[in-house]
Amino acid sequence: MARGKVQMKRIENPVHRQVTFCKRRAGLLKKAKELSVLCDAEIGVFIFSSHGKLFELATKGSMQGLFERYMKMKPTRVSHAEQTVETQTLDAKKEINLLKQEIEILQKGLRYMFDGGAGTMTLDELQVLEKNLEIWIYHVRSAKMDILFQEIQLLRNSEEVLTAANKYLQDKIEENTGVTNFIPMATYNTYPLTIPDDIFEC
């Protein structure tokens, strides 16, 4: 009868879990020994049970000897990490130097513009200055458009408030006078104020 596929999850039953641990541990240690004999490999295995019990295997010599050999190999790995950190540091320094050069070019360009073209600038420096000026102009225009949109929105809000106030006043006038469709009278022609002379005659 074929064995069913074992699901890779924690065994909840503690008895079954312990039995499985003992069988699998013995199988793992047996495979380690076979690998050591067949391939002439030095193998060290640490196993801690769920209760904290230690099981270990050193196929050649002692576990202490294998551990010391491992520690001798570790500095090589550390040196690789140090090289990685050093490379990252050099890249950061290179980027900082490039930023410093760009700042110096921009400062030189500002002096060139505000001093009426005093001094000289190379073609590369002028191209860098042109690129940054385009970026600055873009940001200035974006900020200006944002301000204009805000002012337009404020005007729209004010218009809505005035419209509502006007409607309220018209409703009050209609309520008090009974006059509907009240339209304020406006005069477009201007006439001089004259008084007849005969009004003062006795």
Image (cartoon, grey):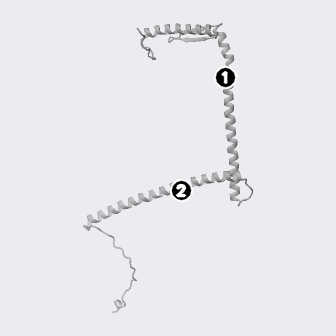
Callout 1 amino acid: Arg
172 with respect to 81 (left or right): left
Q: Residues within 10 Å of mark 1 (few under 14, many from 20)?
A: few
Q: Which numbered marker is on residue 144?
A: 2
- In this rendering, the answer to whether 33 lies above or below 115 is above
- In this rendering, the answer to whether 182 lies above or below 152 is below
Q: What residue is at 29 percent from the left and 65 percent from the top?
A: 173
- Coordinates of residue 171 in the picture (x, y in percent): 29, 62
Could you tell me which secondary element the residue under label 2 belongs to?
helix
Check disc 1 and report the residue beneath it.
77
- Coordinates of residue 125 in the picture (x, y in percent): 70, 51
Could you tell me which secondary element the residue under label 1 belongs to?
helix
Q: Based on the displayed image, in which of its 4 quarters is residue 97 positioned?
A: top right
Name the residue at the bottom extreme. 202
Q: Nearer the viewer, residue 168 or 62?
A: 62
Q: What residue is at 41 percent from the left and 59 percent from the top?
A: 158
- Coordinates of residue 9 in the picture (x, y in percent): 45, 17
Mark sitting earlier along the chain (2/1)? 1
Q: Nearer the viewer, residue 122 or 37?
A: 37
Q: Nearer the viewer, residue 51 or 63?
A: 63
Name the residue at the right extreme. 119
